[in-house]
Image: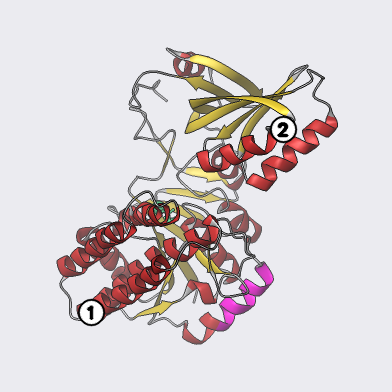
Amino acid sequence: MALKVFKFGGASVQDATNIKNVCSILKNHSNEQLVVVISAMGKMTNALEEVVNAYYYENGNAYEKLENVRKFHYDIISALSFEEADLAYSEVNDHLVEIEWILEEPVQDSYDYVYDQIVSIGELMSTKIIAHYLRSKNVNALWLDARDCIWTDDTYREGRVDWEMTKTRLKSKIDPILNDSNVIVTQGFIASDSANNNVTLGREGSDYTAAIFSYCLDAESMHIWKDVPGILTADPQCFDYTTKIERLSYQEAIEMTYFGAKVIHPKTIKPLQNKNIPLYVRPFNDESSLGTCISDVDELSYPPIIVLEQNQAIINISTKDFSFIAEHHLSEIFDTLNRHRVKVNMMRNAAISFSLCVIHDSHKVNAFLEALKQDYVTDVITGLELITIRHFNQSTIVEMKRDKIILFEELLHNTIRLVVKINTTLKRKSVDI
Ligand code: ASP
Ligand code: MG
């Protein structure tokens, strides 16, 4: 029988009501072979990040923050009120104790390493609770540790998958337990390296996990259940008028996510495309809808699609001796970007300066600037937005430029990108697209 991979994100398991909804969806598919990939509940990854920061930078009470995480999970278990609740409480407690052990020691390791050891616990707790809950509702859920299946290198916070090892391990773990009466519940976002340390795959990486499982197990289809009707022409939290796109080609989905569309993790599509596995992005509150289907279709004609990325910075770099920016400078700058893992969205060079538009992760950007300090003069403009319009038309461009200062503008085939400064609030009216 054909295997399906389902993925439920943080919002779909943020409270007891939504977890019950997940349970009812799974019940309706309980005679199929299912692997279910689940994220940490609600905003728990952010809450665990706060624990890490308080511990690592000593800028808050890590234990207090951890207690909030405990309370959140305990409240959900109690609101679900089910038979195996005692087991769920004690397993959540065991995971929290693992974090307490880390907090008791002085900081020794890199930030990224510590981050992964602590933050990955969010997915472990959510899947433990949900697996127990499902069993109490007669769904035969088997809990699988994704860290036993997905292997990466030790690039903490951005693990690079070892596909061969992952495929072998995953099949050897799954094949014996995969049958029609089981629902396999596993964690998104987390993996392990060859020393068995926790490694995460990058924020919002659960989609990617589901794609890794789909690829390695030759799934018939992958389904991401979300709190939106499907993929829309723009983010409904930022724009008033959006419409659902029924079908997308893999190529268009890759481009959209590359340009920053948050609806799916950018690494998700490629493994699916390689095996021609269709991806459905569907609403978890309307099971009858298949949402948006991403598959191997010929290029379709699309309406203007707008992708908004906030928290951008422009970094202007020039040499201290006012010499032209030559190839060896570029090579040095790129090498430094790579070392500090600064994410570049756009770049431009002029005679004596080189400018980059980057994601403003202040931790990484500051380290990058510090490393360039000796030979270059830099200045940084923060608080910017990057607007990408795919399949643009003139009215969309005019609308997107309104009330903004345009700092960078780039036209690439059917895509226009604008780095802008705005002073209005996030909520804005968009053109009717
Ligand atoms: N829980 C992780 C995050 O919030 C992974 C995910 O949700 O996809 O980034
Ligand atoms: Mg999420």
Q: Nearer the viewer, mark 2 or mark 1?
A: 2
Q: Nearer the viewer, residue 173 or 431?
A: 173
Residue 361 visible, this angle:
no
Q: Is residue 357 above or below residue 45?
A: above
- Give the quarter of the image for residue 319: top right
Q: Is residue 162 above or below residue 179?
A: above
Left or right: where does residue 17 sit relative to residue 175?
left
Query: Where is residue 194 drawn, in percent x and y?
Result: 63, 74
Q: Nearer the viewer, residue 164 or 178?
A: 164
Of marks 2 and 1, which one's residue comes earlier in the chain? 1
Does the magenta run of residues contain 165? yes
Measuring 16% from the left and 69% from the top, which residue is drawn there?
78
Query: Where is residue 172 drawn, in percent x and y?
Result: 58, 83
Residue 136, disc: 1
- Give the quarter of the image for residue 332: top right
The quarter in which the C terminus is drawn is top left
Q: Which residue does the numbered mark 2 point to in the structure image?
A: 374
Measuring 27% from the left and 53% from the top, which residue is drawn there?
285
Q: Residues within 10 Å of mark 1 (few under 14, many from 20)?
A: some
* Mark 2 C-beta to ligand 1 under 8 Å: no
Q: Residues within 10 Å of mark 2 (few under 14, many from 20)?
A: few
- Give the quarter of the image for residue 263: top left
Q: Secondary structure at mark 2?
A: loop
Query: Where is residue 213 drawn, in percent x and y?
Result: 54, 67
* Amino acid type shown at disc 2: Gln
Left or right: where does residue 36 sit relative to residue 353?
left
Measuring 43% from the left and 63% from the top, which residue is drawn there?
118
Q: Nearer the viewer, residue 348 or 284?
A: 348
Measuring 25% from the left and 58% from the top, which residue is drawn there?
68
The magenta segment is: 163-172
Query: Where is residue 348 drawn, in percent x and y?
Result: 70, 24
* Amino acid type shown at disc 1: Ser
